[in-house]
Image (cartoon, rainbow, N blue to C red):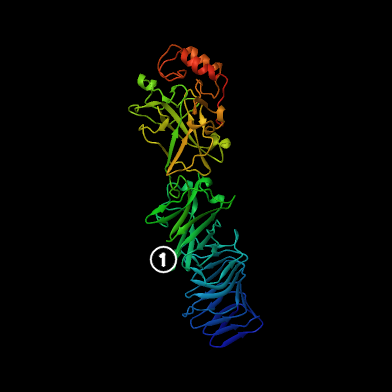
Amino acid sequence: MKTTIFTTLLAVITSLAHAQHVVNDGGNIVTEAGSVLVIEGDFQNNANSDMNNNGEVKLTGNWTNDDVGGNLLQGTTGTVTLNGTSTQTIGGTAKTWFNDVDVQNNASIGTETSVSSNLNLTGGNVSLGSSDLKLQSGANITGAGPTQYIVAESSGRLIQEVGAGSVSYPVGTSVSYVPATLSNSGTTDNFGLSVFGDVLDSGTTGSTIPEIDNCVNNTWNITEETAGGSDLSVTTQWNVSDEGSSFDQTQSGLGHYTAGNWDPQEATAAQGTGPHTLTRSGITSLSAFAVGDVNSPMVIQLVLTIDLTAFLEGPFDLTDMNMGLNTAGVLPLAQPFNTAPWNYNGTETVATIPANTVDWVLIEIRDAADAASATPATVIERQAAFVLNDGQIVGLDGSDALQSVATIINNLFVVIYHRNHFSVLSASALTESGGVYPYNFTTGEAQAYGGANGHKEIATNIWGMVAGDANADGDINVADKSIWENQAGTQGYKSTDFDLDGQVGNQDKNEMWVPNDGAGGQVPE
C-alpha cells in the first residue's frame, strides 16, 4: 500500500484528493469547505501534527491520533466519514475532536473521543470498549436504532449534556439495543451511560442476583460529571428477549442501586408492546439501574391492610352472630379449605381459637378492572382468616385486620368464602383510606356483586352471606338437602350445620336451606 507522509509542510486540499495510507508527521493538513480528501486506508496523526478539516475526509481504514496536544480537529467544521468494509478503529494516545462523524460501517473507539456537532449512524455500530465518547453541548446523534447504535457494555461511556428537556442515549450491548432517556429538571450537567447484560447484587460488581429470572437481564450505569444538583427522570427500554423467564411486565419497577442496596420502585405495568419502557423520576444521585418485577429487589413490597366486615346468615341473631362452634369447641385449629372446591394449601394454624370467633373464612384478593372481570384468573393472593361475632374479619391473632403484600396494578377486589354460605365479591373496588383498605358487605344491597342475588337482607338494612350451600358449589338445591339428610342428628364441624351451633338438626334445613333453595351464587368463576 502506498503511504503518503506529511512532515512540516502545509498541505491544503481545495477540491478532491485521493491518498492511501496517510501519515501526518509534523505537518498541517487543511481541507477547505467543499473539498474532499479520500483516504483509502489508515490515517496516522503523529506528535506535533495537525489537521484543519472544514470539508470532508472519507476514510476506509483506522484513525489514529498520537498528537500530544490532544486537540486534533477541535474547532473545525468538517465531516469525517468512516466507510470501510471492516470494523474501523478510532484510536491513538490522544483525543480527537470530531465535528461531524458519519459512521457508515462498524467502528470501535480505542481512546477518548469527542463530537462537537453530529454523530450520524448510517450503517453500523460504534463500540466504546473502555473509552468514553463525549458529545459536546449542542451535539446530536442521528440515525440510531436496533441495527446501528452505541455499544457501551464495558467501562466506556456515552457522555452527553442534559439540561432542560430529554436526551436519548442510543446504547446497547453487543446483542441487544437497550437505549435510555434522561430528562433533567435540575442543574445542567454531563451524564455518562453504559449498559451490560446482567443484574448484580452490588450494582456494577458482585454476583448475579438470585432473582435474575424475575428481571430484565441488563443494568444501565449512569454517572454525572459534577455531583449534586441533578433531578432526573430515567427511562429505560428493553426487548422481550432481554426478559428473564419469570419476569412479569405487569408488575415491574426500575430499581436504583444506592447506599449499598437496590432501592425499589412501586410496581407498575411496563409501557409498550415490545420493546417495553419504564420511567423513574426524582433521581438525585447516579449509579446502577435495573428492571425487575414484584418478586425481585427492584419493586417495593407494599403491605396492604385490608379491613373487612361481613355477616353469615346462619349464626346471625338480630345484631351480631352466635359463636356456637367456638363454644362447642369444634372449630379446627388449622384452616379447613384444603379440599375441593377451594383447594387452598395455606398453612394457617393456631394454638387456640381466638375469643369471639364464629368460624374460619377464606379471603381471596383479585386484581381487575371491574367486578365483572374479577374472575379466578385475576386472583393474586389467598389467605385464611377468622370472622368474629361482630362481622370483623381478622388475622390469626384474632384482632388485627388482614395484611397482604400483593401488588395491585388495576383495582383491588375481595372475595369471601365460607364452607356452607355463598361466597361474596365486593361490588366496588376497595380504596385506600388512612393506609387501610376498608370494605363492609353488611351495609347495603349494592355492596356485593350481584346485589340482592349476591347476598340477602338478614335484618332491616343489614345484609349477609346466604346460608345453605353444603357442598360449596355455588347453588342451593336438593344436593345440599341430601347431605343434610345424611348428617341430620350429628354434632361437630359439619357442612350442613348452617346456623353454626355445632349440631345438625331441622332448624338448619327449615330455617336456612328451605328459604334459600334454588338460589345461586354470583361470584365470577
**Quarter of the figure with the N terminus:** bottom right
Looking at this view, is 242 or 488 the one in front?
A: 488
User: Which residue matches tag 1?
Assistant: 228
Looking at this view, is 372 or 30 the one in front?
A: 372
In the rendered structure, which amino acid carries the disc numbered 1? Answer: Gly
Q: Position of residue 224 (x, y in %)?
A: 44, 66
Q: Which residue, as the protein is rendered here, is positioned at the far bottom?
A: 9
Q: Position of residue 503 (x, y in %)?
A: 42, 15
Q: Around disc 1, counting alpha carbons within 10 Å, would you say few (fewer than 14), some (14 to 19), or many (20 or more)? A: few
Is residue 108 in view from this perspective?
yes
The answer to which quarter of the image holds residue 525 is top right
Q: Residue at x 34, y 27 (%)?
A: 355
Q: Is residue 269 above or below residue 171?
A: above
Q: Position of residue 452 (x, y in %)?
A: 56, 28
Is residue 131 in view from this perspective?
no
With 61 as the anchor, is 112 left or right in this view?
left
Q: Is residue 302 above or below residue 115?
A: above
Q: Which residue, as the protein is rendered here, is positioned at the far front?
A: 460
Q: Residue at x 39, y 21 (%)?
A: 325
Q: Is residue 31 above or below residue 158?
A: below
